């Protein structure tokens, strides 16, 4: 009976490990540099970015400007070099870090372009 108990405990532990591993694949870790596209929004949390996206989509410029003026949301400039830290497939967002910043920001999928070989533009 003790062998069966140990086998069940090990099987449960293995199942939990597999489930945990599957959850981490939803947010893939990357270590690549990209260039930003002008006009896209960025925020320190996915929820705030979704809020800003909603205001932008609804045409509520006043509320969007409030978020931008309070520095809760940033408007990206063209060709700023950033490092992609994490991809959220569920939210269709990417967590980025600016070269000159310690903080991380979330941007919508499509806000970045891959740096091509020979492409050495990186404005700050």
Image: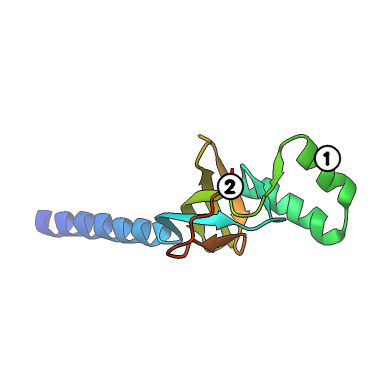
Q: Which residue is mark 2?
A: 123
Q: Quadrant of residue 74?
A: top right
Please state which of residues 64 and 88 is positioned toward the viewer in this rendering.
64
Q: Which mark is residue 25?
A: none
Mark closest to the chain's N terminus, 2 or 1: 1
The image shows residue 72 at horizontal and vertical percentages of 71, 38
Q: How is the image coloured?
A: rainbow
Tags 2 and 1 touching, CB below 8 Å = no
Within 10 Å of disc 1 (Cα), the crowding (few <14, some 14-19, many 20+) is few
Residue in view at x 58 percent, y 45 percent: 105
Count every numbered label the image shows and give the total: 2
Q: Quadrant of residue 21?
A: bottom left
Q: Secondary structure at mark 2?
A: loop
Residue in view at x 83 percent, y 40 percent: 66
Left/right of residue 91 with respect to residue 7 in the rendered view: right
The image shows residue 94 at horizontal and vertical percentages of 54, 55
Q: Secondary structure at mark 1?
A: helix
Of the 4 image quadrants, the one containing the C terminus is: top right
Note whether 76 is above or below 68 in the view shown: below
Residue in view at x 71 percent, y 43 percent: 73
Of the 4 image quadrants, the one containing the N terminus is: bottom left
Within 10 Å of disc 2 (Cα), the crowding (few <14, some 14-19, many 20+) is few
Left/right of residue 10 with respect to residue 102 in the rendered view: left
Left/right of residue 35 with respect to residue 19 in the rendered view: right
Q: Which residue is mark 1?
A: 66
Note whether 70 is above or below 113 in the view shown: above
Please state which of residues 103 and 38 is positioned toward the viewer in this rendering.
38
């Amino acid at each position: 009976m003790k062998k069966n108990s140990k086998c069940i405990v090990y099987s449960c532990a293995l199942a939990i490990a597999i489930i945990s591993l599957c959850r981490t694949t939803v947010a893939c870790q990357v270590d690549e540099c990209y260039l930003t596209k002008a006009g896209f929004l960025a925020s320190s949390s996915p929820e705030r970015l979704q809020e800003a996206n909603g205001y932008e989509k609804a045409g509520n410029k006043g509320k969007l400007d409030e978020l931008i003026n309070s520095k809760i949301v940033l408007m990206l400039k063209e060709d700023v070099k950033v490092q992609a830290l994490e991809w959220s497939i569920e939210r269709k967002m990417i967590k980025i870090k600016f070269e000159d910043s310690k903080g991380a920001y979330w941007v919508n999928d499509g806000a970045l372009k891959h740096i091509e070989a020979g492409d050495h533009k990186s404005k700050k």
